[in-house]
Amino acid sequence: MTQSQSEQGGRAAALRHALLGVRARYDLLSRGQTASLRRCRTADEVALEGIFWRVAGDLGRDERHLAQVVLLFPLATQTNRAQFSFGRYLRHSLPEGDGATLRFRRLLDSRDRDELGHRLRGILRLAARSQGTVDWGVLGVDILWFFAESDSVRRRWAQDFYAPQAESALKTAARSAASDSVP
């Protein structure tokens, strides 16, 4: 691993930890304060709210796209699951059907941050019906680096969304097939 990859990994870990702190401060807000953030339609509107700056603190100045992450907070609760993947979360949380796949595909095709924020709000609202939880540290880092040149976030989300089910499901299917073939 090159030093720049190591530095990026360290920055991602620090950013993830800081985002968890931002989410914890968000969870302490009153209903009226969270309502003012929920009424915001864009990340620019969030960045104009005094409540955002109380929640974001210095991180809001350092990470200018943090308002986009805070805009999504009301749509899912926080978890600290090991190996959280947004693609897997959507695969398990979205209702069955081509509509969910089409929404996911449009999310991946987002051209700018405003479109990404709009599509994330829609797909998270739909996924929230399943009462699933999101690791905001991981998702926040993914959102902040979504438009990186390598497109690694898009590829990882797509791989995790479209990938076959877990090995345990494959083993169960193999056992079932083996028992069916026994006379």
Image (cartoon, helix red, strand yellow):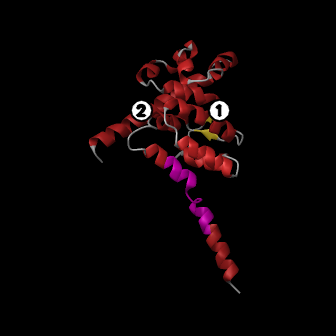
In the structure shown, which secondary structural element does the residue marked by tag 1 occupy?
helix
Q: Nearer the viewer, residue 122 or 141?
A: 122
- Image position of 40 (left or right of 21): right
The C terminus - image quarter: bottom right
Question: In what element is the residue under mark 2?
Answer: helix
Q: Residue furthest left?
A: 3
Q: Position of residue 136 (x, y in %)?
A: 55, 34
Q: Residue drawn at (70%, 40%), measured in percent from left and top?
A: 131
Residue drawn at x 52%, y 47% is 157
Crowdedness near tag 2: few (<14), some (14–19) or many (≥20) residues, C-alpha within 10 Å: few
Report the disc number at residue 14.
2
Q: As shown in the figure, which amino acid type bears the numbered disc 1?
A: Leu
Query: Hey, what amino acid is under mark 2?
Result: Ala
From which residue to which does the magenta span run?
156-171
Residue 103: horizontal and vertical position, in percent? 62, 44
The CA span between labels 2 and 1 is 24 Å
**For this view, does 161 lie left or right of residue 34?**
left
Secondary structure mostly taken by the magenta-highlighted segment of the chain: helix
In the picture, residue 8 is in which quadrant? Answer: top left
The residue lying at 53 percent from left, 20 percent from top is: 44
Q: Does the magenta-highlighted stretch encompass residue 58?
A: no
Question: What x and y, as percent, mark residue 28?
Answer: 62, 21
Is residue 96 depicted above or below 122 in this figure? below
Q: Nearer the viewer, residue 35 or 151?
A: 151
Q: Residue at x 64, y 69 (%)?
A: 173
Q: Is residue 159 shown in magenta?
A: yes
Q: Say whether residue 90 is left or right of residue 58.
A: right
Q: Residues within 10 Å of mark 1 (few under 14, many from 20)?
A: many
Residue 75, numbered circle: 1
Mark closer to the chain start, 2 or 1: 2
Q: Nearer the viewer, mark 2 or mark 1?
A: 1
